[in-house]
């Protein structure tokens, strides 16, 4: 989430609108998931794996 917020505020945009952290700024999943709880869980797992990969180098 922090990475997405940093990308959002550092990307040039003619109509910049400040926003709080939310799942809407994350990259979308490859597959469509209708169940909101499952969709957010998958997004959270992607974020956790991304952090682990960066830490492990």
Image: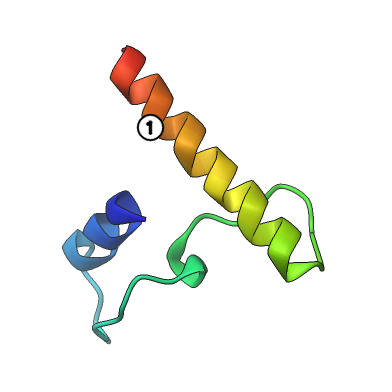
Residue 18 place in picture, x, y as percent: 24, 83
The quadrant the N terminus occupies is bottom left
Camera-side residue of 9 and 42: 42
**Figure coloring:** rainbow
Q: Is residue 43 left or right of residue 47?
A: right
In the image, farthest residue toward the top: 57
Q: Residues within 10 Å of mark 1 (few under 14, many from 20)?
A: few
Residue 30 place in picture, x, y as percent: 71, 47
Q: Quadrant of residue 14?
A: bottom left
Q: Is residue 53 left or right of residue 19?
A: right
Camera-side residue of 16 and 1: 1
Residue at position x 30%, y 81% from top?
19
Q: Quadrant of residue 9?
A: bottom left
Residue 37 place in picture, x, y as percent: 71, 64
Q: Is residue 24 above or below residue 47?
A: below
Residue at position x 62%, y 59% from top?
40
Camera-side residue of 3 and 51: 51
Q: What residue does disc 1 label? A: 51
The quadrant the C terminus occupies is top left
């Amino acid at each position: 989430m922090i990475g997405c917020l940093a990308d959002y505020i550092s990307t040039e945009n003619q109509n910049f609108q400040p926003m709080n952290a939310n799942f809407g700024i994350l990259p979308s999943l490859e597959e469509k998931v209708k169940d909101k709880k499952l969709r957010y869980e998958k997004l959270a797992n992607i974020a956790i794996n991304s952090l682990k990969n960066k830490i492990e180098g």
